[in-house]
Image (tube, grey):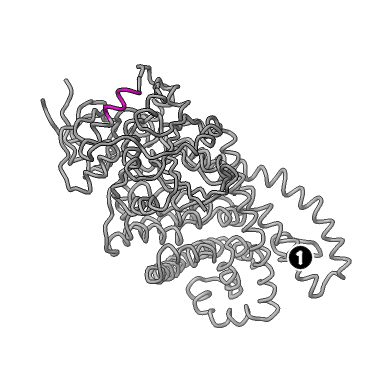
Amino acid sequence: MKKILLMGSPNVGKSVIFSRLTGVRVIASNYPGTTVGYTRGTMRLGGEKVEVIDVPGTYTLDPTCKAEEVAVEMCADGDLIINVMDATNLERNLNLTLQLLKKNIPLVVALNLWDEAKHIGITIDEKKLEELLGVPVIPTVAVTGEGILHLVNRLPEAKLGQLTYEDEERWHEIGRITEQVQQVTHRHHTFLERLGDASIHPITGIPLALVALFLTFYIIRFIGEGLIGYLFEPIFNGLWAPLMMKLSAILGSGGFLHNILIGKLVGGEIDFVESMGLLTTGLFVPLAMVLPYVFAFYLILSFLEDSGYLPRLAVLVDTVMHRMGLHGLAIIPMLLGLGCNVPGTMSTRILETRKERFISVTLMAICIPCAAQLAMIVGLVGKAGTRGLLVVFGTLFLVWIILGYLMNLLIRGESPEIFVEIPPYRLPYFSGLAKKIWMRIEGFLREAVPFVILGVLIVNVLYTLRIIEFVGKITAPVITGVLGLPREAVAALMVGFLRKDVAVGMLSPLGLNLNQLVVASVVLAMYFPCVATFVVMAKELGLRDMILSMLIMIVATFLVGGVLNWVL
Amino acid sequence: METVNLTRMKSGDRGTIAQIRGGRGMKMRLTAMGIRPGTKITKVSAQLMRGPVTISMGNTQVAVGFGMARHIIVGLEG
């Protein structure tokens, strides 16, 4: 199959064009390095099926880092390259284009962000540019789809570039071309630009970041609690519970099948958290307790991603992150990890060195609970007021800082400085935003619901076979002695390997007091990540570093859990 | 013309990059983003405690770590 490569500098819209061409849905955001792996898709071109590859962004073909090296290698087996350019930054983008012209692979240029360029007073004579480069140049607005059809129609015209120049003369040549095709009209600063500058100045930026943080928490809680209180709980309590009670009666209010499907009745009623049946807890936890918060979280995160705020936040927190052997950009994987550790772990690829990636992956696995787990902790510990929640999240935050500081001292390797392009603020396109949120929700439903149900099933099997009782006896010295939890809590720790949300839910029937709940929540958050994260971590870190990471995790968990139990 | 390194410029100051002192790798990374001798820049901001420096050139804004910024020598305008 013929291969078409989408290549260009970071954050020029390659992934959006990829989506438009192939119909494959991918996450696209407004910061450099959103795409960390290769996404492949296919499209029809003149009755022929061709493969399209979304290559991570690179500023140059003289590789300056690992990610760029891979992009350059990739370049060798393309049959056609679509070079996506940012029309608002013609000069800098031409640097890559001129290098691609020397690759002897047919080329087409998509001059993207065409609307934004016009809007800020940049006029580009695309015909003239086409003439100078000797390859087709098509203006596009990927987010609205403008120009995409034209781009596809002209793909067959792709050809080798006509431009010849000496490498030393490249920037000179770029200057010559830019002068001939681009006109810039002077204009006043827009509101978004002023806001952009304000949010990267320390004096205005730090207060703005705090406001953003506060608003984020507030909105997530408002939406999450609202959806639970006014939509999901009424549905489950009013409609689903009576139905399940009927089923319970049909099944004879007890017995093996009843226990699997409905679970235990609590005071003759179904308790959606404690019953532990596939059709009760198995559905209630993912849909009515977790989903509302997952939705609210991704709504805010997606908005922040598309607005262009995250790289600015990265610059603001850079100094603090340096103490942890990371640089500011590492805040982006951490935020993604708060949604789900799996994409969070993968996105650590935007960091350059082994040391940075090891520290960030380990910190995330230990200190960053995912949205599902967060929702359950808020639901369970938050019932007794905010004090417990403050202790849980305060502890995790402290451990994050201290562990990062220690790992920076102990782990050998380099921690390079931040070097990142700050994209302009953009108002997110509603359709793009909605699509991205839906993709993430769908991903959650597809992966979470089956795993939660499997988790609930395993809980039942473990109890029935008395395995939990047995393990509880063996581990009692640690669970009870060090952590101050009842033996039965070991069941939650076992299920935590599979799904952390179910595990937190399993603490509910144990009758723990607030301090025990706090200890158990912190321990569950810190110790082994769920199986999906575990697999991705192993892949990203390699065996040796994975073992080291797990050792750090075990020591940290029991140390922190023990200290908490002792202090509280 | 007075030249200073990027960290010594005040926010809002303009200038033209005169020289990049540093290894080949660093020069290549900076050049790939269009930061090279002759580029006209404006310093946008600097973070406290030797934090990164943000500069703008054309329609691009870039944040550069403090250490790297020290190696970028700028000729001040006016």
Q: Is residue A262 above or below residue A1?
A: below
Residue A78 location in percent, x, y?
43, 50
**Magenta segment: does it hold A41?**
no
Residue A558 location in percent, x, y?
44, 70
Q: Is residue A451 above or below residue A27?
A: below
- Extent of the magenta region: A175-181
The answer to which image quadrant residue B68 occupies is top left
Q: Secondary structure at mark 1?
A: strand
Q: Mark 1: few, some, or many residues within 10 Å (few <14, many ≥20)?
A: few
- Residue named by callout 1: A266
- State left or right for residue A8 relative to residue A511: left
- Residue A309 visible in the current orientation: no
Magenta region, main secondary structure: helix
Q: Chain of mark 1?
A: A
Q: Residue at x 56, y 33 (%)?
A: A149
Residue A109 location in percent, x, y?
43, 35
Nearer to the camera, A269 or A122:
A122
